[in-house]
Image (cartoon, rainbow, N blue to C red):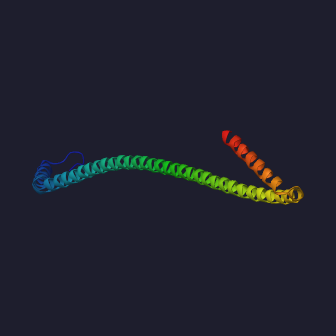
Amino acid sequence: MSLVTPDFGLLVWMTLIFGIVFFVLAKWGFPMITASVRERAERINASIKAAKEAEERLRNLADEQNALIEESRKEQARILKEAASSRDAILEQARVQAREEASRIMEQAKAQIATEKESALRDIRSEVAMISCDVAEKVLRKEFLQDDAKKEYVSRVVEEISSARADSLKN
């Protein structure tokens, strides 16, 4: 038997054994192998599909997150704007109240000053009148020793006062 050329019997047996092994593999082995390859392909496809869905969900979540961030920024800006306008309104109201209060205090102070001024002028006039009366009394005491001089003087003073009042009422 040579190594390069096999015998006819060996060839028949090898063919027969190959056919049996091929039949057993074709009957039970190949279906199991193809089923496991098919299952693996299905698992890979399912994993790819799940990964694509997860990626799409992540994209959607990222879009939703961006939308929520933008919405929260708008809300923050709106709240800040409202707070600023409220602050401005409160400040303006405080300014107006301060002006009104200052005006009221000034009016009260002016009224009080005017009242005190009038009171002081009355007191001064009263004192001047008293002093004038004392001086006039001393001067007139000498002149009014007679009753006729007293009556003449009183009527002249009444006349002067009446004309002075009439002039002051015209002005």
Q: Position of residue 97 (x, y in %)?
A: 56, 53
Image coordinates for residue 110, horizontal then vertical, percent: 67, 53
Picture residue at 86% right of the left edge, 56% below the top? 140
Residue at left offset 67%, top offset 39%:
170
Give x and y (percent) for residue 81.
48, 47
Quarter of the image with the C terminus in it: top right
On the picture, is 54 further left or further right than 145?
left
Residue, x 67% and y 55% (percent of image)?
109
Q: Residue at x 49, y 48 (%)?
A: 85
Query: Is 2 in front, or is 23?
Result: 23
Q: In this orientation, which residue lies closer to the viewer: 23 or 63?
A: 63
- Number of marks in picture: 0
Quadrant hosting residue 134 = bottom right
- Of the pair 114 and 79, the residue shown nearer to us: 114
Please state which of residues 128 and 17 is positioned toward the viewer in this rendering.
128
Image position of 15 (left or right of 84):
left
In the rendered image of this protein, does residue 157 appear above or below residue 119? above
The location of residue 38, given as percent across then percent down, is 19, 51
Give the farthest residue toward the top. Answer: 171
